[in-house]
Each structure stands twice: as C-alpha cells, then as structure tokens.
Image: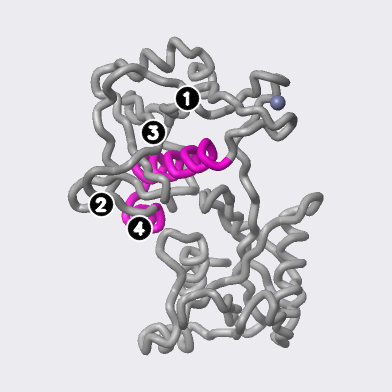
Amino acid sequence: MHAWMSEASLDRADNRRKVPEWVSAQWRRPGARLLLVDSDGQVATDETGSGPAGVPTSGNYNAQLHTFLGLVDGIPWFTTEGPIIGPSASLRHLGAVTGGAALELTVGAVALTAWHRLEPHCSGCGARTRATAGGLTRRCPVCGRVQFPRTDPAVIVAVIDPDDRILLGRQSSWDPGRMSVLAGFVDAGESLEQAVHREVFEESGVRLREVRYFGSQPWPFPRSLMVGFVADSVSAELTIDRDEIEEAAWFTRADLAADLAEGRVIMPGKASIAHRLITAWQGRLLG
Ligand SMILES: [Zn+2]
C-alpha cells in the first residue's frame, strides 16, 4: 500500500501538545531531534541525501521558534527554520526516496515552517500572532483568534477515454516534454467532484461520465492537499483552453511507453500523486 494510504507513523500528540510544559519536556528528552528546514524549503539530510536527518536538541526550548512535529517510535521530533550547514535536499527529492515516518516528518517540517514564515499575522485584526500548541496553531494576542495552517485543496484527475487512453496535458511554463494529468484548485463553495468536472471541461472540453476517488497526499508548495480522482470521459474530442494548458492529448499505453523511451515525454516527479496516477493506469490498476 502507498505511504499516504495507511495510518500515519508520526504521532502528532494532538492533545498533549496543548500543554506547553509537556512540549518543553519533550525538547529536553534524551534523543529528541531537531530537523532544520531553510527558507527555500530545503531539508537537512544524512550524508547520502536518502532521508531527513535531525540534530540533537540543545539550549532552551523556544515555543516561537521550535515547532513540535510529533513522536516517532517514542522519539520527539521538532523543526525550525534556519540555515543548514551540511547536506540538504528538497521535498520533491525526499518524497521520491523516502516513505513512512521519514516522509511524514519531511512534509510536516516543510509545511509548518512555510506556514510560520508566510502567515505570521492575524487574518482578523492584522496583529502578529504567537505560536501555540507546539506550533500547530497560532493565536492572536489582541483579538484571541486561533489560526490553523491553511490547506488549499486541489483536484488532480486521470481522465480515461472509452478506448482506455489517458489524457495528459502540459502547461507552457513546464520543462519541455513534461506531461501530466489535469489538475486545478477547488473553488470556494464547490465540491471536489464538481471541481473535477469543471477543471477538466475548462482545460480540455471533455465531459465526464463517472468520477471515482483515487487517494490524496499533502503537497506543501506551499500548502496544497492534492486529491486524486479517476474519471471516464464521455467522448475523446478535445477543445484545449490555451490560456490554461499549452497542449493535451490522449495516450495509449504503447504510445506513452514509446514517447517516454524516446524522451519525447517526461513523467511528473516520482514524489507526486500525478506520477502515482499515471503509473497506476499503466499497470491497469485504476479499475
Ligand atoms: Zn487578531
């Protein structure tokens, strides 16, 4: 089963972390680790770059700097933003080579450090908020509003035509040859399924017959949750919206295999749910 489909390995200790003394006691525990993330979202790794690497916590715990990620096999993990001396890697890289707790720590650290960096003010009154609950929330000292990390839902969909071909498209800003399944943000007041129908029709002119849930994964660039679907198209006729995508086309498994082998098409990165959707279709696993 895929990493994002089963119960989390990271225990976020949602209730205990509301007690500041408990969180600071975790910081002082032998074995507690601090995972550094820099302002570009690079994560400290081991020498081989094969996984996130924490350093022992030291000095005093500072609730405004040190975010508690949770416990892995009883070991407390924290994160903070700062320059990394030594090897580091991007989430896109680590997402392709890690899984389980290592992946969850990486994604959590990138997501939370970005949130604290990008959204330090109260959305109600504009005052500077203070990190609470071990950095999982921020509270406004002026109006009392409690803010949670924003998550922006986006749908991503493998559209399959009546001949079992997959629809892939590309944005003009992407590297030459890169193709992917269609995706877009969910509008306010819209359901996920409605967003699937709307995005696919807007971008490709294709109407959908049936939409099925595939799976989801966090995508903190900086704060998306990708929700994957599989959809059957009514027909294969395409009307491309050039403002949204540069090109789109239907691929048989043989077409795609040949284009990939010849380098004419490049797959989405291995860490992405787009990669999962396309490889599941290649393996006839979409049902
Ligand atoms: Zn406020």
Which type of secondary structure does the marked residue at label 1 adopt?
loop
* Residue 21 x, y percent position in the rendering: 44, 10
Q: Nearer the viewer, mark 1 or mark 2?
A: 1
What stretch of residues is rendered in magenta?
91-118
Label 1 and label 2: CA atoms lie apart by 29 Å
Which residue does the numbered mark 3 point to in the structure image? 79
Among the two numbered marks 3 and 2 on one chain, the one whose residue lies closer to the N terminus: 2
Badge nearest the viewer, 1 or 4:
1
C-alpha gap between disc 2 and disc 4: 9 Å
In the image, farthest residue toward the top? 21
How many C-alpha atoms fall within 10 Å of the one at disc 2: few (<14), some, or many (≥20)? Answer: some
Ligand 1, what quadrant? Answer: top right
- The residue carrying mark 4 is 93
The residue lying toward the viewer, choosing from 44 and 104, is 44
Query: Mark 3, mark 4: which one is toward the viewer?
Result: 3
Q: Residue at image x 39%, y 44%? A: 106
Vertically, is 235 above or below 39? Answer: below
Q: What is the quadrant of residue 126 in the picture?
A: top right
**Amino acid type of the residue that numbered disc 3 sits on in the rendered structure:** Thr
Other-residue count near label 4 (Cα within 10 Å), few / some / many at <14 / 14–19 / ≥20: some
